[in-house]
Image: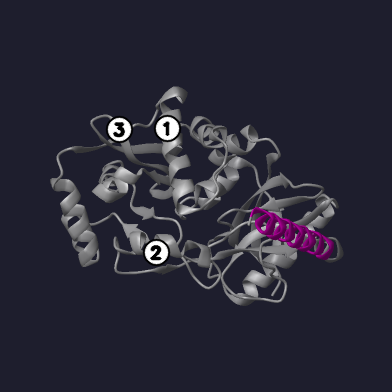
């Protein structure tokens, strides 16, 4: 099986992808965010053909690491034909050849794949997921509620009865107003033990994508922020990208009310698929903590394509893996020493 790839301009890319579910990161609208973040730039959009049949579209972002450069097709390729194991391998081979010819300084490409294969490597520095919870927003609201697990229906109804909590959409808020939300994210990260980025990263995402593609929802009590979420939207597909809740919000079920409000507001604006974005699996045990919360909103868990690294220059990629491994061992050793000194 042979696949050929060719660059596409934005208009052609959009025309060829009409009717397909295109994640925002694979759409031209994402370029504004890439352009606004240091070390990231849009690279190319490509079409992949098997003979005369267009089988996939893919959009790459160029990223700079410390001493190396790579491409990332986040949530891509967008498959227009069945993503068989053979077709995936043929596409990756064509992409590696295309990338190597275009820029010999690129060490690897990162993309998503469904089938394990020898050319796929675990990610160097970030976490992927291959299971998620997806809400179908096409039925009536009562049917959506009925499709949740019993615990989910109970928690949503309980939260709806608490008239002290008010869920609203605050898309288009000012930078000053966002600082209040960010402090709740800082609290969430400290409590749940995960790292967060600088405030400007989240604000840049909101500002660059604009209200059409990045929406903010907040649950408050007497003006206090209990929970908030950032949702990205492209056409009729939405993703729950970031979330935070205060200690008070966790106790009061503010996040349950928030998810329900987001689902109904998104549905009313034409969104038909709402991805809650990732739960744990053998590849992503770090996400165990969010499983109980997200799975109560659906009886089903969806398998999705996880991200993988594909070396463009295998020797240089192997050197990177070795260097990062040595760095992690050094950091772990220093932490152990500090711990002993502290004791």
Determine the residue positioned at 24% across, 60% down.
152
State which quarter of the image contains the N terminus.
bottom right
Q: Disc 1 vs disc 3: which is toward the camera?
A: 3
Mark 2 / mark 3, whichever is N-terminal = 3
* CA–CA distance in space, label 2 to label 3: 27 Å
Percent position of residue 53, x then y: 60, 64
Q: Is residue 312 left or right of residue 293?
A: right
**Are the residues at dot 2 and dot 3 in contact (C-beta closer than 8 Å)?**
no
How far is mark 1 from mark 3, CA to CA?
23 Å
Residue linked to disc 1: 211
Q: Secondary structure at mark 2?
A: helix
Residue with the mark numbered 3: 224
How many neighbours does mark 1 have within 10 angstroms: few (below 14), some (14-19), or many (20 or more)?
Answer: some
Q: Is residue 332 magenta?
A: yes
Color encoding of the figure: one colour
Q: CA distance from mark 2 to mark 1?
A: 29 Å
In terms of secondary structure, where does tag 1 sit? helix
Q: Check if mark 1's residue and mark 3's residue have beta carbons within 8 Å.
A: no
The residue wearing badge 2 is: 291
Q: Secondary structure at mark 3?
A: strand
- Camera-side residue of 325 and 336: 336
**Place of residue 327 in the rendered image (x, y in percent of width and height, measured from the top left):** 77, 57
């Amino acid at each position: 099986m042979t696949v050929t790839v060719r660059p596409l301009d934005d208009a052609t890319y959009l025309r060829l992808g009409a009717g397909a579910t295109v994640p925002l990161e694979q759409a031209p609208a994402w370029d504004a965010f890439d352009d606004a973040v240091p070390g990231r730039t849009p690279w190319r959009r490509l079409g992949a053909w098997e003979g005369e049949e267009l089988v996939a579209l893919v959009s790459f972002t160029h990223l700079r690491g410390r001493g190396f450069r790579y491409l990332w097709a986040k949530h891509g390729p967008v498959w227009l034909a069945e993503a068989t194991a053979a077709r995936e391998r043929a596409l990756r081979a064509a992409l590696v050849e295309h990338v190597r010819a275009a820029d010999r300084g690129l060490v690897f490409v990162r993309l998503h794949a469904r089938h394990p294969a020898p050319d796929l490597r675990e990610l160097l520095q970030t976490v992927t997921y291959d299971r998620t919870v997806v809400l179908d927003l096409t039925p009536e609201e009562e049917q959506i509620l009925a499709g949740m697990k019993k615990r989910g229906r109970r928690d949503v109804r309980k939260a709806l009865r608490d008239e002290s909590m008010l869920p609203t959409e605050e898309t288009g808020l000012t930078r000053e107003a966002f600082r209040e939300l960010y402090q709740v994210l800082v609290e969430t990260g400290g409590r749940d033990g995960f790292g967060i980025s600088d405030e400007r990263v989240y604000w840049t995402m909101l500002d660059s994508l604009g209200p059409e593609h990045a929406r903010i929802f907040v649950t408050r009590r007497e003006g206090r922020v209990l929970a908030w979420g950032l949702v990205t939207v492209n056409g009729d597909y939405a993703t729950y990208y970031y979330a935070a809740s205060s200690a008070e919000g966790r106790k009061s079920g503010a996040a349950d009310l928030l998810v329900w409000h987001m689902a109904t507001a998104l549905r009313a604006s034409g969104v038909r698929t709402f991805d809650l974005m990732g739960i744990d699996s053998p590849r992503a045990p770090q996400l165990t903590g969010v499983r109980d919360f997200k799975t109560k909103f659906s009886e089903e868990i969806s398998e999705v394509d996880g991200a993988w690294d594909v070396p463009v220059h295998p020797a240089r990629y192997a050197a990177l893996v070795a260097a990062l491994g040595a760095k992690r061992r050094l950091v772990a050793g220093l932490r152990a020493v500090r711990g002993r000194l502290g004791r």
